Amino acid sequence: MPSLRFASAVAVSICVCFCSMPASSTPPQPIAILTQASGARLAESEASPGLSVYEGERLQTDAGGRASLRFGDSSLTLLGNSDATLMHIAAGVHVDLSSGTLRFSAAEAQVVEVHADEAMIRSQNGQSTDATLTMVQPRVPQIDARRGSLNFTYHQEFRLLPAGQIYRIYLDSPDGPETETSPGAQIAGGGSKVTYYIVGAGAAGAIVWATYYAIHSRNAPISPAIP
């Protein structure tokens, strides 16, 4: 009997030990890798090339700083005075841009979406994209769509921004400040919540933009103002 009790005690002890051990879990995978970092901080620590960027980590740059990241065949670059947080999404990455400038290059099979002041800018899947988003001031994003069209969403409003133009967008300001409209700027479109400007586009480019929407958009096209 004593030997049986001893064996039972040993068995219970082993069981308790195994039960108290934490369950094994898959280690978190990095979203991206830093390829360049100067005057930059990752999760409040100094950033340097080669560091991994994980879900929810914050990346910041100083006035003259710069930070570049790569995920798959796509890349992101934060310029000076920028503040962003990265999250993983299906087939790509989501960036919460609080301030500054973000340039992104998305491969055809990957997606980059940027959230800034409640607006969402997203590359189109199946289309290579090269674009830059700058927060000119609070609630005024400027988008340079160099290659690949972009989806722009703000609350219930959706627009497709064709490639080859620079758009300055005023959120919740149907009549963007006149001081911001240079003689060469074209009013590309407007709505109840958002006013769009094509910055520096010629009259022909603005007409093409309006014609595009007449064919492809459910929204009634708004003719650009041509000086």
Image (tube, rainbow, N blue to C red):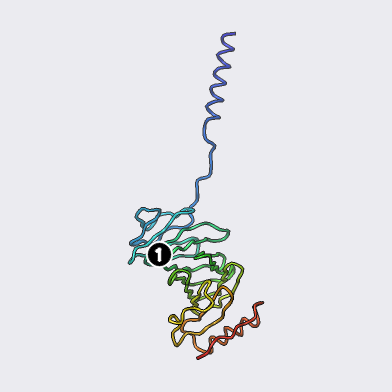
x 33%, y 66%: residue = 63
Quadrant in the rendering for residue 14: top right
Q: Nearer the viewer, residue 30 or 150?
A: 150
- x%, y% of residue 47? 36, 56
- x%, y% of residue 100? 41, 67
How many numbered discs? Answer: 1
Q: Is residue 10 above or below residue 52?
A: above
Q: Where the N terminus falls, by quadrant?
A: top right
Residue at disc 1, secondary structure: loop
x 53%, y 22%: residue = 13
Q: Is residue 21 above or below residue 69?
A: above
Q: Nearer the viewer, residue 204 or 71?
A: 204
- x%, y% of residue 208? 57, 86
Please give left or right for residue 5 compared with residue 54 in the image. right
Query: Quick one: which residue is furthest to the top in this view?
Result: 1
x 53%, y 86%: residue = 205
Residue 112 shows up from this direction: no
What is the three-letter code of the residue carrying label 1?
Ser
Q: Nearer the viewer, residue 147 or 72?
A: 147
Q: Which residue bears the numbered disc 1? A: 82
Query: Quick one: which residue is furthest to the bottom in this view?
Result: 227
- x%, y% of residue 11? 57, 20
Quadrant in the rendering for residue 53: bottom left
x 47%, y 74%: residue = 142
Q: Nearer the viewer, residue 145 or 201?
A: 201
Badge 1: few (under 14), some or many (20 or more) residues near its Cα, within 10 Å?
many
Residue 84 shows up from this direction: yes
